[in-house]
Image (cartoon, rainbow, N blue to C red):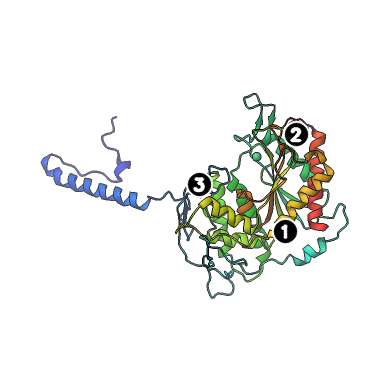
Amino acid sequence: MSKRYDYSLYGKEPSKGGGSGMLLPAILFVIVLLLALILYKVATREPDETPSTIRRTTTVRGTDMDGTGSEASGKHVYDEEPTTTEDPNRIQILNDEPEPTRVGEFLKRWPADSAIENLHDARGLMESLGGRPDGPTALQGVTVILDPGHGGIDGGTVYPASPPHTHIEKDIVLDLARRTRAVLEGRGAEVVMTRDSDEWFSIYHRAAQAGQLILDRTRAALAGTPKTTDWLDEMDQYMAHIRSLNQDRGGGSVIGGAGTQRQARELYDLQRQYPEVIFLSLHINSFTDPAVGGLQVYYLTNESYYNYEAVTVGGPDPNMKPVYQNYDSDARYNLAMAVVNTLSIDVPETKTVGGPQPLISDRGFVVLKCMGLNTVLVEVGYMTNPDDRVRLQDPAYLDRLAAALGRSVYQYFCQ
Ligand SMILES: [Zn+2]
């Protein structure tokens, strides 16, 4: 039986009849259809990354050709509706006005203190960690998020350049992360891996995992108190959305783009209340000159992040959001130094050779800028350096690196 009319396109049965009597209704129908199409185009002219259930919408476009997820060329549209109400049971948003642009500068800053009321007090724990003797309970209370870079379709840096590859970054850093997890758990730390299989997650997905961890902990801590969780619910949705996008480019949602969106700032400020949680991203470097080798450790402070954005953006942009300025810069520096110092003693082969410095703070990597946790990105060697490459294939060497990374976390918290 032939199908004369597809009802699914129109949703109703067409009226019977035909001939010249149908001409006017047909013309009217076409006009209505065109109007509807125009209205639809207008309503969807921005590629909206944000699910409709999220009240404060944000649209971020652009690219991050440098791999840092900076999306500096993007346009940003967000409304300024604050979350604060007079209800004391709601999570209170404080200080939500950006600082005015300073003389001689073109970027605004968020205030260097918290937008979120204090919901987690880690002072007692942090004090109790100081001076603890090394041993199986030294890092009890500490959480380390281990982030083995790349995975799945993204091998990271490989050798040789053409397949078959004998050395693949994603596999080596996953192996190293698992060994490091064992070392840290041996000191009583809780370890969370951003991936524990050959699966690819975007850089934003990884930052969103770190966001979700803190949201979950805060929700658990508030259970049984009169606090309402509207703000946490909203943040949960942003994190779920970023994970569902799972894109390096344009996948940042509220944590993407140049500068820092209001919601991201609030999330980072909550994360800042959890100094016992750190984020450690593991990678392997590459460079054109095979003589360059050894360790490189990347970190980001308030000033280095501000300068990074200023250089990346290059000039005034009316849509530019203020720059986040409430990282614990000292702690981030100390964490990076703990890694450099410990590895230089325990694994002297990681000594940086061929020119570059081991400590770098001018790169706006997503896993450094898109969280309020203390975070560091460690390139444990160069795939392009023959000595590093041979060592990184040796399980015994990976064990030594893992032991040193574990000791650097102990140094950071306890020494
Ligand atoms: Zn990498």
Tell me which residue sits at (66%, 51%) in the image. Answer: 361
Establish if 92 lies above or below 30.
below
**Relative to the observer, which residue lies in front, 356 or 13?**
356
Q: Which mark is residue 250?
A: 3
Instruction: Dividing the image into four quarters, tell me where ligand 1 lies.
Output: top right
Instruction: State the image coordinates of residue 252 (x, y, percent, origin top left).
Output: 54, 50
Point out the tag, 3 or 1, that comes first from the N-terminus. Answer: 3
Q: Quadrant of residue 306?
A: bottom right
Of pointers 3 and 2, the one earlier in the residue sequence: 3
Q: Element under label 2?
A: helix
Give the residue displayed 79% in from the left and 42% down from the top: 402
- Residue to which mark 1 is pinned: 331
Residue displayed at 53% across by 70% down:
84
**Kind of residue at badge 2:** Asp
Q: CA distance from mark 3 to mark 2?
A: 34 Å
Say whether disc 1 or disc 2 marks the residue closer to the N-terminus.
Answer: 1
On screen, residue 376 versus residue 19, left or right, reads right
Q: Label 1 crowding class (10 Å Cα cut-off): few <14, some 14-19, many 20+? A: some
Label 2 near label 3: C-beta < 8 Å? no
Is mark 1 in CB contact (under 8 Å) with mark 2?
A: no
| Image quarter of residue 143 | bottom right
Residue 412 spot, x, y in % from top left: 78, 55
Q: Give the mark toward the camera: 3 or 2.
A: 2
Q: Kindly state the secondary structure of the residue where label 1 is placed.
A: helix
* Left or right position of 4 against 49: left
User: The residue tagged with tag 3: helix, strand or loop?
Assistant: loop
Name the amino acid type tagged 3.
Answer: Gly
Residue 235 in the figure: left or right of residue 135: left
Residue wearing tag 2: 388
Q: Amino acid at mark 1?
A: Ala
